[in-house]
């Protein structure tokens, strides 16, 4: 199968240039000047007036995740189909080492969730709930399997929280093995006290989720995670950074030359604490915006955009973790602390971030870098993923900057009964999405023969930035 994407403008993390792109055997085969003869194509896509970019990589999703007595509403099938519609061709999800269990068992569980279901390629991070001697030993086996990044939590005492000694040991071990520790950096012990105190005062509404998880808890956790990584002499990656003061800690570390990396998510750039307050007369609607860390007041947005522009934030991932309002978010109807934490987002990342390009907040090249190239490099998938380069996987997004779409639960493909962006009109949308050379989505319609199970597991390489 030879595919020609002709007349488009190629956009990579570094360059913008006119070229025809040829795909063959699942790989990018050639980039040539418009009109150059390279024989016949089995399929041609005319990309005149459009941008040809590497497919999106979402380095933070939670498909089929058990959480708070329920399970995230997208599984690896529905969630990856939705991702592809939005221009994302690779996800990195999270397998979980259960307390008292092995990472191997956790990984097998998550292979079972994804295999035969995922429609696009996928990798896994490993959530470590314990860093005891056997877990530290097991990290080597995970890295051999291509699970080269590990997530640890300073939050959720009794569930995910690990203490500084365990984090430090895991960091040292990751450093020996070429793994990367990623951190959920809110300090959860005092947060839990604040939650209990709020509930005791009768505060039940969704907004108290934010009011009991203040910015300082994330800023301090971020600083502590950076300190631990500095002591261990290893890189560290902050997941879902949401707040100005947490970003300042990252900036300070980077200014001192430390290999500190951080991602933010669209919800922290486009939603705010106001959304958590719901609508007048119906504060419950705020439940759809409960995620962790919580949405912050609006003034944080400008800081995060500046962080993206100035390279202090490297990645925008989604933390896609949808729960339906009905029956799922409703578990916390009378107690904000029981609202499952998470928002849908795997499909809307490109639509939203493109607004940042249109408004001049980031360049097109930076858009490509934060949605694809940087996560590919940081998480050991480059140059197989994350670039339009000869020999790379032909995961290609043809982006139409003029195509309009109204975001909403009925116009998107995620399996969830609301949209945080209901009715929002966006300009700029995928015209065609290729996964390993196969056209999977064209003009918002799934066109590949296969859907379930066409995605492949990505055995990722060690950290090498
Ligand atoms: Zn997450």
Image (cartoon, helix red, strand yellow):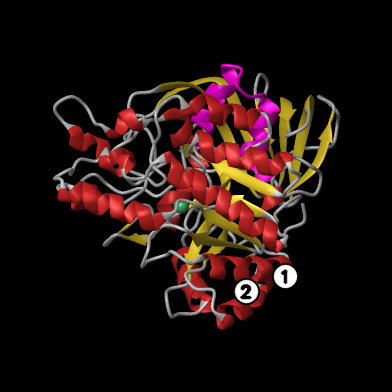
**Front-most of residues 45 and 208:** 208
Q: Which residue is mark 1?
A: 177
**Front-most of residues 43 and 129:** 129
- Label 2 sits on a secondary structure element that is helix
Q: Position of residue 68 (x, y in %)?
A: 29, 59
Who's the residue at 68% across and 68% down the image? 172
Who's the residue at 58% across and 34% down the image? 432
Check whether the beta carbons of the residues at disc 1 and disc 2 lie within 8 A of each other.
Answer: yes
The tag on residue 139 is: 2
Residue 155 located left or right of residue 416:
right
Specify few, some or many for label 2: CA neighbours under 10 Å numbering under 14, 14-19, or 20 or more: many
Who's the residue at 72% across and 70% down the image? 177
Residue 270, above or below 90: above
- Label 1 sits on a secondary structure element that is helix
Residue 410 located left or right of residue 359:
left
Q: Position of residue 334 (x, y in %)?
A: 14, 48
Residue 326, above or below 270: below
Asked whether the viewer can see residue 388, the reply is yes
Q: Position of residue 286 (x, y in %)?
A: 26, 36
Asked whether the viewer can see residue 439, the reply is no
Residue 293 located left or right of residue 247:
left
Who's the residue at 42% across and 25% down the image? 298
The residue segment tinted magenta is 348-374
The tag on residue 213 is: none
First in residue order: circle 1 vs circle 2: 2
Residue 390 among those drawn in magenta? no
Q: Position of residue 310 (x, y in %)?
A: 68, 30
Q: Main secondary structure of the magenta part?
A: helix
């Amino acid at each position: 199968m030879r595919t020609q994407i002709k007349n488009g403008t190629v956009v990579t993390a570094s360059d913008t240039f006119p070229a025809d792109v040829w795909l063959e055997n699942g790989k990018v085969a050639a980039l040539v000047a418009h009109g150059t003869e390279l024989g016949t194509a089995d399929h041609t896509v005319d990309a005149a007036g459009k941008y040809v970019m590497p497919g999106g990589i979402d380095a933070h999703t939670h498909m089929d995740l058990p959480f708070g007595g329920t399970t995230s509403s997208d599984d690896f099938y529905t969630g990856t189909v939705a991702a592809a519609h939005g221009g994302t061709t690779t996800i990195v999800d999270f397998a979980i080492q259960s307390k008292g269990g092995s990472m191997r068992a956790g990984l097998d569980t998550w292979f079972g969730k994804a295999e035969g279901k995922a429609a696009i390629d996928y990798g896994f991070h490993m959530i470590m709930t314990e860093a005891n001697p056997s877990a530290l030993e097991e990290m080597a086996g995970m890295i051999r399997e291509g699970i080269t990044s590990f997530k640890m939590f300073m939050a959720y005492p009794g569930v995910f929280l690990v203490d500084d000694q365990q984090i430090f040991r895991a960091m040292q071990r990751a450093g020996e093995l070429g793994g990367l520790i990623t951190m959920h950096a809110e300090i959860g012990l005092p947060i839990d006290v604040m939650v209990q105190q709020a509930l005791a005062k009768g505060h039940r509404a969704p907004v108290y989720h934010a009011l009991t998880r203040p910015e300082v808890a994330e800023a301090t956790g971020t600083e502590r995670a950076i300190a631990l990584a500095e002591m261990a002499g290893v890189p560290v990656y902050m997941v879902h950074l949401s707040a100005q003061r947490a970003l300042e800690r990252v900036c300070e570390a980077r200014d001192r030359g430390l290999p500190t990396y951080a991602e933010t998510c669209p919800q922290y750039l486009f939603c705010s604490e106001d959304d958590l307050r719901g609508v007048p007369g119906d504060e419950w609607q705020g439940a759809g915006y409960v995620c962790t860390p919580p949405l912050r007041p609006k003034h944080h947005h400008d800081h995060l955009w500046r962080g993206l522009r100035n390279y202090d934030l490297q990645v925008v991932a989604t933390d896609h973790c949808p729960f339906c309002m009905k029956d799922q978010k409703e578990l916390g109807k009378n107690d904000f602390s029981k609202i499952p934490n998470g928002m849908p987002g795997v499909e809307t990342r490109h639509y939203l971030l493109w607004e940042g390009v249109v408004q001049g907040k980031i360049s097109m090249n930076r858009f490509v870098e934060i949605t694809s190239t940087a996560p590919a490099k940081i998480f050991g998938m480059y140059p197989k993923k994350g670039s339009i380069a000869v020999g790379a996987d032909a995961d290609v997004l043809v982006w139409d900057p003029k195509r309009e779409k109204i975001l909403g639960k009925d116009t998107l493909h995620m399996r969830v009964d609301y949209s945080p962006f209901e009715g929002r009109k966006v300009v700029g949308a995928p015209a065609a999405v290729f996964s390993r050379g196969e056209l999977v989505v064209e003009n918002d319609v799934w066109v590949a023969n296969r859907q379930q199970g066409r995605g492949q597991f990505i055995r990722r390489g060690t950290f090498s930035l």
